[in-house]
Image: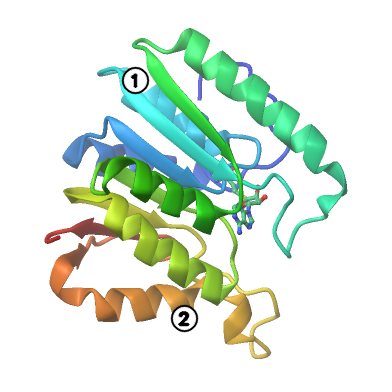
Amino acid sequence: MSGSYDFTADWFGRFAEIWRQVLKQHPAGKLLEIGSYEGRSACFLIEECARERPIELHCIDTWAGGVEHNADGMAQVEARFDANIALARATAAHPVAFHKHRSASHPALIQLLAAGGGERFDLVYVDGSHQAPDVLADAVLAFQLLKVGGVLIFDDYLWSMEAAGAQDAHNMPKAAIDAFVNVFQRKLTVLGAPLYQLYLVKTAA
Ligand SMILES: C[S@@+](CC[C@H](N)C(=O)[O-])C[C@H]1O[C@@H](n2cnc3c(N)ncnc32)[C@H](O)[C@@H]1O
């Protein structure tokens, strides 16, 4: 990434090259991110997508941290998010219409659906709560907001809070992502990609 951003964590960098390939195949102008933290993935999306065209980006986060985070420093995390997004927007090649939703994901997604009638995003990135019930609801609501032909990306497909051999399915996105993909199988295609994230395309409403 090009700007002098202020990041203290990098959960995203190792996927950047895969995302560039996905975005080349599926150009995105309207984007939604669930779980933004300091804005690392959001700034990447601004740099990559606004290089080609004006974009609209919505970021949803409580900025309270998930169960796996120490919630103490989250005010500073949010301040870094604000500064990083401002920098990415100021240096973007094309305008970025930016919408920050400081909220739990489910009410924010329901509000977006109610406001716009659904099916309007080219790309949705699900990286908020890692608890299976939350991820399942994020997936179902995000899918309703995704255009046919749009891309849905899940982070942490293979993440678990507990050590290998002692996992609790409640604390893993995988059970929710698998359930979602199985139930919606007639309406999506899973893209071939390395497996820590899961990439799919909506093929039917
Ligand atoms: C792993 S971080 C996101 C990382 C970010 N996408 C990046 O690449 O740097 C997960 C974020 O999800 C947020 N979060 C956790 N549960 C949430 C929920 N139920 N609704 C909205 N945001 C949530 C946390 O506050 C945290 O900032």
Q: Is residue 191 above or below residue 111?
A: below
Q: Does residue 171 appear left or right of residue 154 in this picture? A: right
Res 40 → quadrant: top right
Q: Which of the marked residues, 2 or 1, is nearer the chain's N terminus? A: 1
- Residue type at numbered disc 1: Ala
Task: Report the front residue among 162 and 105.
Answer: 105
Residue 50 marker: 1
Q: Is residue 55 above or below residue 25?
A: above
Secondary structure under badge 1?
loop
Q: Which residue is identified by label 2?
A: 175
Task: Report the front residue among 50 and 10.
Answer: 50
Residue sitting at x 56%, y 48%:
35
Residue placed farthest to the right in the image? 72
Split into 4 quadrants, where in the image is the C terminus?
bottom left
Evaluate whether residue 196 shows in this view. no
> Residue 187 appears at what percent x and percent y?
16, 67
Residue sitting at x 40%, y 45%:
112
Secondary structure under badge 2?
helix
Evaluate whether residue 77 shows in this view. yes
Query: Mark 1: is the Cβ under 8 angstroms from ligand 1?
Result: no
- Residue type at numbered disc 2: Ala
